[in-house]
Image (cartoon, rainbow, N blue to C red):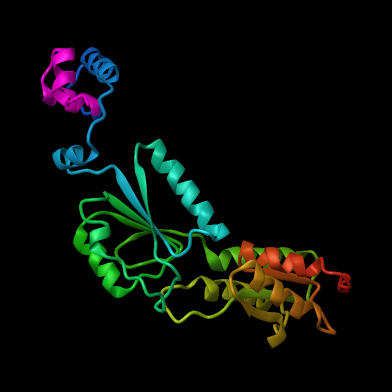
């Protein structure tokens, strides 16, 4: 197996220059960098990621922490994050912690991250206080998606505004008997999406002077199966809704499946 000394000898430079050239660091001329790259390719030299990280203090790895890897929404988030990180020269350490919320068993362990990652991306996961404290002690950047957490940057949509806009669209089409399929209330106070989306629905209906009766709000699991169950329950009513606002794409798939079942005609 080739060593860094072999590449340095072939390129006529020091091992420090080889290291800088292969890591893309400055203060290496384009000509020298190319000579080092050619020598490394000829020698089939592969730099040790462990040695590189010890020298630079950087691993080139970002942890992506998710509650599920098989769910449609999270799979798309993981794919998008992985593509963007690869384009910027980073690798992904995927950390699947199982079910979300205080009931999940796995607490993040500092050994998963210490000297292994440069940052963490937390996807729609409500963190335990101990986990937030642990990530804070490690001192690297943390960004959350969907769930705000004190001290971290967060990327999320306006949940109230999005559902309000969807509801206003249906009202504009002439619908008055509109139902809402949302998520079951969750015990953690920092997971605000289900409540915010229901708030947006109720606000749009109130602004239009339309009542919201108890039957018009159906809480379900945020899955296609949950949407199917809620959709069938609404469609079996004697007085059915003429339109439905659904709080997530996965639940919407289930509601659409319910509407396609035999015997369900369009409500009037």
35 or 255: nearer the eye? 35
Q: Residue at x 14, y 38 (%)?
A: 55
In the rendered view, does 261 fall on the left or right side of 96? right
Magenta span contains residue 3 = yes
Q: Residue at x 23, y 60 (%)?
A: 111
Residue 124 percent coordinates (x, y): 45, 64
Magenta span contains residue 211 = no
In the rendered view, does 65 fall on the left or right side of 132? right
227 or 246: nearer the eye? 227
Name above or below for residue 159 compared with residue 199: above
In the rendered view, does 93 fall on the left or right side of 247? left
* Quadrant housing residue 237: bottom right
Q: Residue at x 75, y 80 (%)?
A: 233
Residue 20 percent coordinates (x, y): 18, 27
7 or 141: nearer the eye? 7
Residue 234 percent coordinates (x, y): 76, 79
27 or 268: nearer the eye? 27
Magenta range: 1-22
Q: Residue at x 43, y 45 (%)?
A: 82
In the rendered view, does 209 fall on the left or right side of 130? right
The residue furthest bottom is 214
Where the C terminus falls, by quadrant? bottom right
Where the N terminus falls, by quadrant? top left
* Quadrant housing residue 220: bottom right
**Magenta-colored segment: predominant secondary structure:** helix
Q: Report how many numbered discs are placed on residues in the image.
A: 0
Residue 6 percent coordinates (x, y): 16, 19
* Quadrant housing residue 49: top left
């Amino acid at each position: 197996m080739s060593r860094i000394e072999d590449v340095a000898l072939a390129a006529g430079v020091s091992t420090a220059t080889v290291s800088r050239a292969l890591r893309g660091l400055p203060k290496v001329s384009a000509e020298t960098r190319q000579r080092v790259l050619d020598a490394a390719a000829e020698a089939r030299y592969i730099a040790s990621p462990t040695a590189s990280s010890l020298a630079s203090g950087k691993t080139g790895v970002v942890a992506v922490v998710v509650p599920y890897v098989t769910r449609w929404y999270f799979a798309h988030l993981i794919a998008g994050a992985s593509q963007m990180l690869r384009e910027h020269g980073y690798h992904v350490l995927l950390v699947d912690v199982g079910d979300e919320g205080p009931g999940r068993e796995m607490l993040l362990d500092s050994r998963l991250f210490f000297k292994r990652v440069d940052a963490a991306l937390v996807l729609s996961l409500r963190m335990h206080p101990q986990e937030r404290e642990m990530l804070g002690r490690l001192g690297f950047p943390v960004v959350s998606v969907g769930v705000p957490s004190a001290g971290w940057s967060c990327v999320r949509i306006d949940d109230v505004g999005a559902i309000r806009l969807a509801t206003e669209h249906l009202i504009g089409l002439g619908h008055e008997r509109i139902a809402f399929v949302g998520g079951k209330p969750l015990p953690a106070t920092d997971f605000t999406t289900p409540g915010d989306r229901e708030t947006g629905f109720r606000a749009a209906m109130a602004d239009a002077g339309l009542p919201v009766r108890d039957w018009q709000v159906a809480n379900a699991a945020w899955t296609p199966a949950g949407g199917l169950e809620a959709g069938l329950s609404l469609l079996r009513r004697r007085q059915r809704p003429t339109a439905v606002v659904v709080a997530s794409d996965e639940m919407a798939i289930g509601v659409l499946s319910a509407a396609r079942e035999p015997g369900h005609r369009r409500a009037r």
